[in-house]
Image (tube, grey):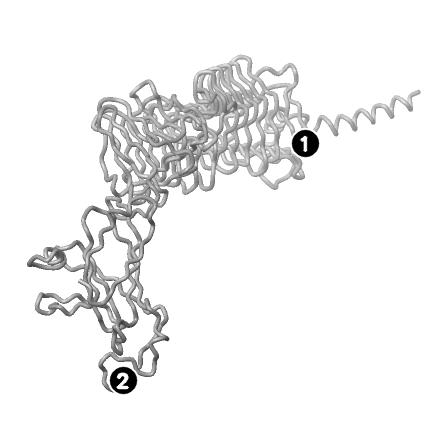
Amino acid sequence: MRSCVFLLGVSLSAMSCAYGNVVGLQTTAGGTTYGPYPSINEALTTGVAAHSTTTPVLTLSGDDTETIGTTVPSTITSLSIIGSSGAIRTIIPAASLTSSLFTNPNDNPLTLNLSNLTFSGFRNDSVGGGVLYASGNGTITLNVSGPVTFTRNSAIGSGGAIFGKMEAISGPVAFTGNSSSASGGAIFNNNNNSTMTISGLATFTGNSSSVYGGGIYAGSNVTLTDTHFANNTAKTSGGAVYMEGASKTLTYNVTTSVTLGPTSPATSAAGDNDIAGVSDAMFTKSGTGTLTLNTNNLNWVGNTTVNAGRFIIGDSNHPHAQWGSSTTTETPYINSNSGTLGGYGTIYATTINLSGGTWLIGINPAGTTPPCGILTLRGGGAYLTLPANIEIDGLVGSGFPPYGYTVATGYGNSLSGSLDTLNAKLAKYNVTLTESSNPPFSLTLKELPPGVYLGSPLAQNVLVTFEVPGFYNGRAITTYGEGLVVWYGLEGPAASGEAGNFFSSGTPTSVVLNNRKQQVLSRNDANDGTINAVSNESVTPWSWTGSVALPISGLPCAWQLWTHTYGNTPAYPTNAAQRGNNWVAQGQLNLSGYVGAFLNVTHQITPGEK
C-alpha cells in the first residue's frame, strides 16, 4: 500500500512539472535559465527578486494559465516572452482572474519582445486593457519576432487588448475578436505627444467597441504600414481607426495593396470597418501602393493628402463607399500632391486640389447606383482644381446614357484648370468632359461619337491618305533621286483664286510620300522624265502614298504637291518668288462631311490639278 502511494506521488509530481511549471527565466538573452516557474507572475515576482534583472527573458515550454495579474516592476525596462522550440504557446486566464494580465503604472519606457504566443480571453472588469493596462506615463514598444495573436480579450473600460501610451508595434501580430465597452476594441492609445507606428504584418480582424475605434482608438499621430483591417466595428464611428487627437495625423503607408471592406456590403454603415476622426485630424496616404476603402467613411471630417500611390474610394463592387461627410462642410480640403485619387464611390470636401496628381473615375453602367465615382464639393467656397492626368476604370461604351454621367458637382467658385488637357487624354476612352456653370456647378462625362479625336482642345480627326500615281500621261512624276511631299494647312486667299498666299499664314505642315513598291527609276540619257529600262506596266497606278490625321472643321484644308530630294527633310519655299508655280498639283480638301463613323478617307491627286 505504501508502495502504491509513493508511485502516485511521483506521477503527480511529473504532471505538475509538465503542465504547471512551464516558465523559464533568464536575466539576459542566452544566459542561465532559472526555474521553471508555474506562471509568468511567479517568474516576474519570485524569480526576478531572486535573480536581479532589468531585462528578464521568459521562455514558455508549454501553454500557461495565469491566476493573478502581474504589476510590472519599475526596474524592468525590457520584458521578453518567447514560445520555446518555435511552437505557439497559449496564455489564458483562470476563471478567477478579472484584471489585466499586465499592469504597468510606471513612468519609464517599457519594451515588450514577444514571439510565438497567443494571449486569449483576458478581461479587465474594472478599467481598460485586457492584456496590458499601462496607466503610467511610460511609453510601450511592442516588438514581435514570431507570430503573436491577441484574441477574445476584453475590457469594461477602453482598450480590449491594450491600453497605454503606445510607441511602436512591429509584426507579425494579429488582433482578433477583442472588444471594449468604451473605445478601442483592440488598442486604446493615449500617447498624445508622440507617434504610434505599426509595421510588419499587422492585422486587425473582428474587433469591436461600444463607442469609437473598433480596431484602434488614437489620441496621437499614427503611422500604419501595410496594416490590414477586416470586420472591425464601432457603435459610433471608426470601426477600423478613430483619430481623437487635435491636429494629429493618420499616415497610411501602403507599399503593395491594402483594401478595407465593410462587414456587410449591402449596408456599408458608419462604424463598419471605417476610418473616422475629429475635424482637425489629418489623413495622409503615402507609399507607392494602392489603398482601397470600400467602407462608409462619412465621419472623416479632417483634411486629406495623397502624397503617393493610389487612394481609391470604392471599387466596382462597392459604389456606395464614401469619404467625408455629405451633411456638413467640416471637411476642409483634399490635396493630391503626386498620387491618384478617385474610385467608384463618392468623395466629399469643400476644396479638392488635384493639380499635382491623377483623377481616377470608375464607371459601372451595369445597373449600379451610383453608376460612377463622383467628387462632391460642399459649402459656398467650394473649389475644384483639375489635374493634368486622368484615368477611366471600368466599362466605357456599354450602356452609356446620352446625357452622360455627373462626375463632379458643387457650389461656390467651382473650377480651376484645363478641361482641354483632360479631354485630350480622355480621347482614348472615347469620352469627354463638359462643364455646366449653372448652380450647382457640374462636370459631366459623355461618350464621343465614333471617330478619331486628337489635339487640345479635342477635335474629331479623319485619317487622310494622299495617293499620287507613279507616272502620268506616259511620263514619270519624279526624276532620278526625287520624292514627293504634300504640304497642307488652312487655305489662304490664293486657294480660292484671289491674290495672296495659298496657305493662310505661317509655314504649312508636310507629309512625305513613300513609293509603296519601292521602285527606283533608272536615269535615262535624256534625263527628261521618260522611263528607261522600266516598262510602264511595272509602275503601279498609285505608287506614292502618305497619311496624316486632319481635323474635321468647317474650314477646307488647302494642300500642295511638291517634288523634293528623296530621303531629305523637305523645306517649304520661304517666299512667293521661290514658290512660283513649281508645285506639281494643288487643291482643297473639305472634311466637314465626314463627321460620325468615318475613320479614314483616301484622296487621290492628279498631277497638274489646281
User: Counting other residues with Cα less than 10 Å from the Cα at mark 1, is it few (<14), some (14-19), or many (20 or more)?
Assistant: some
At 55% from the left edge and 33% from the top edge, which residue is drawn?
173
Q: Is 496 placed left or right of 50 in the picture?
A: left
Q: Is 609 placed left or right of 102 in the picture?
A: left
Q: Which amino acid type is marked by label 1?
A: Gly
Residue 505 in percent (x, y) is at 12, 56
Between 159 and 339, the one lying in front of the other is 339
The residue that label 2 is drawn on is: 524
Q: Which amino acid type is marked by label 2?
A: Asn
- 126 vs 400: above or below: above
Name the image quarter holding residue 498. bottom left
Q: Look at the image and tell me in which quarter the N terminus lies.
A: top right
Does any portion of residue 163 appear in the rendered image?
no
Residue 296 in percent (x, y) is at 43, 24
User: Counting other residues with Cα less than 10 Å from the Cα at mark 2, is it few (<14), some (14-19), or many (20 or more)?
Assistant: some
Residue 419 in percent (x, y) is at 25, 39
- 256 vs 381: above or below: below
Q: Is 92 placed left or right of 107 in the picture?
A: right
Tag of residue 303: none
